Amino acid sequence: MCFLHDMPDAVNCGMDFHENMRRVRLDAGLTQAEAALRMGKRVGDWSRWEPGRRKPCVSIAERIAKALEVDVGELFK
């Protein structure tokens, strides 16, 4: 699995990542369930990443950006 805090490829997320993830999702008019569905994940996964309870790995961060139709860099601004 790709969301554990201690994985070597886990994204070094500051609060900005999680805040941006929420902001971009809301700007797109998506619920957490809709955004999760776009990337083939469960809403439970999304609901752990967005508030920062779990850190996504790099490949998941890229899939989050794709689901939100933004460049992955937008999530790290």
Image: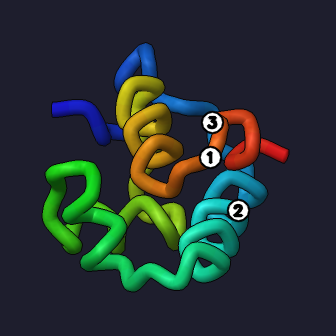
Would you call the spot at circle 3 few (<14 residues within 10 Å), some (14-19), or many (20 or more)?
Answer: some
Q: Is residue 23 above or below residue 6?
A: below
Q: Amino acid at mark 2?
A: Asn
Q: Position of residue 53 (x, y in %)?
A: 43, 64
- Please identify, in this view, whether the residue under mark 3 or under mark 2 is nearer the observer: 3
Which label sits on residue 70? 1
Which label sits on residue 72? 3
Q: Earlier in the sequence, mark 2 or mark 1?
A: 2
Q: How many circles with numbers are drawn on the protein?
A: 3
Would you call the spot at circle 1 few (<14 residues within 10 Å), some (14-19), or many (20 or more)?
Answer: some
CA separation in Å, label 3 and label 2: 11 Å
Q: Residue at x 26, y 78 (%)?
A: 33
- What residue is shown with label 2? 20
State the image quarter where residue 37 is shown: bottom left
Element carrying mark 2: helix
Element carrying mark 3: helix
Foreground residue, 11 or 70? 70
Q: Position of residue 67 (x, y in %)?
A: 40, 52
Q: Is residue 24 above or below residue 58?
A: below
